[in-house]
Image: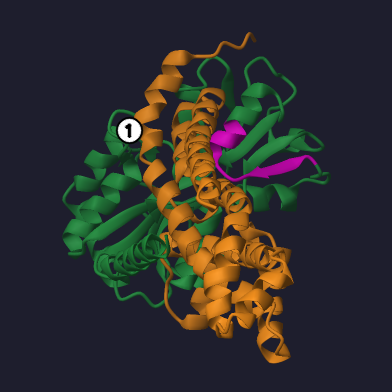
Chain colours: A green, B orange
Amino acid sequence: MTKTWLKTLGAAVALSVSTTALSAEPLRVATDPSFVPFEMMDQETGEMIGFDMEIIAEVAKRAGFEYDLNTMDFNGIIPALQTGNVDIAIAGITITDEREEIVDFSDPYYDSGLRILKRSGDDSISEVADLDGKKIGTKIGSTSYDYLVKNLENNDGVTPYPGSSDMYMALMQGSVDAVFYDAPNVGYFARTKGEGQVETVGELYEGQQYGIALKNGSEWVDEVNEALASMKDDGTYETIYEKWFGPMPDAK
Amino acid sequence: MEFQFDWQAAIDSIPYLLKGVPYTLLISFGGLAIGFALGIFFGLLSINKKWFLRWPATIYIEIFRGTPILVQVLFIFYGLPDLIGGPIDPLAAGIAAIALNSGAYISEVVRGGVQSIDKGQSEAGLSLGLSRPQTFWSIVWPQAFRRMIPPLGNQAIVSIKDTSLFSVIGVGELVRQGQVYIANTFTAFEVYFVVAIMYLCITLSLSLLLRFAERRGLAST
């Protein structure tokens, strides 16, 4: 009895040590489990696919690093970068001053903003002012949450969810009246899974830019920026963009 | 809107969910193995007559029994790296949390088991001329251990289910796999149903195994 226990113990210790040792080599890249169409799981293969996934693969190739990809809830990604549990994160992360104080950002790689998603046939919502006092779903730790809290008189009904799928399900089931979140994500959801049931409404709020987040003081910031710049120059970026979002808008 | 259980969606999710099972098993049994060692160590310390041995054990037990395991694993994963100045692997953090938490409960199981053995047993051992350690390990411990099997099995089942909380630190265990799958398919009911069945399979097989062990153990007395 004692012997088998000891063996299992030894194996467990060896395993936990070896996994730490292995992951010290390639960079640890974190992403969100589902932020369509930036990152999502391919149901056939179980692999993560999406705009961000192709961007980071190309950046890694050009900057010359190997990486292991892991998914974690969005609200855990910045803390994980902060503690050094993760080296790089790409998850449609909006560049903000507050975040910039704790992590390093690459140059922006995507222009975004926030948008309202509501149930089709609900005519009571057409802009952010209409959300006052309503039940609204958003994501924990997101810029849309900050925006709602700052701009609504009565924000008691704002419910932050851990994942985007949670808030979309809440909207479809009627537990919230609207979702306020990143425009490309709500737009993609309205066009795919939510088609006929939900729709986007109103203007784009808060022009925002997504950046690749790196551990504070990371040695890879310059390499990542150079890789992004060269991808934009040689048209690789445009090819990836058009695959996931359709034609690129004209440069401003 | 009428709800229909989509069997196809449930079946489709199985291969992806199964990938979480090895992690669930590794974290629970890896953690429990270490927790068992911790439990024997601190359990025996906690009944020691010397206060300076007893106190550290009591402090450890009260801290890890008195705080939620979810807070413990968040502390280990997000808090400790600041202290030790290096990252912690989520899998290692999960194993450590189960080990420390189950260790505290198992300490109490060990204490209870040992204290339940009648004093007459050790007195008899001593009067036969056995030393104290000899008396303890060859007379008291085997009897106490037999009494510990049911509560240990109980703890094992609790710990297996506790691993479901580690989805928050991104360990790819069963619930995490389910969440990621649902995040992309929106079939919450079907997928969590399959997840629940998988947990039941694990805990039921353990229960059966323990029944068997108990029967064997009791027969040998």
Q: Which residue was labeled with disc 1?
A: A42
Decide which of A140, A185 is in the foreground and name it. A140
Tell me if I can see residue B43 in this picture.
yes
Decide which of A210, A167 is in the foreground and name it. A167
Q: Magenta segment, which residues?
A: A157-168
Tell me if I can see residue A95 in this picture.
no
Q: Is residue B100 above or below residue A132?
A: below
- Counting from the top left corner in percent of width and height, residue A229 is at 25, 59
- Counting from the top left corner in percent of width and height, residue B53 is at 66, 87
- Does residue B71 appear to the left or right of A36 in the view shown? right
- Does residue B20 appear to the left or right of A229 in the view shown? right
Q: Is residue A135 above or below residue B121?
A: above
Decide which of A232, B55 is in the foreground and name it. B55
Residue under the image location 60 percent in, 69 percent down: B140
- Does residue A19 appear to the left or right of B180 in the view shown? left
- Counting from the top left corner in percent of width and height, residue A73 is at 51, 50
Q: Residue furthest front?
A: B128
Q: Chain of mark 1?
A: A
- Counting from the top left corner in percent of width and height, residue B14 is at 39, 28
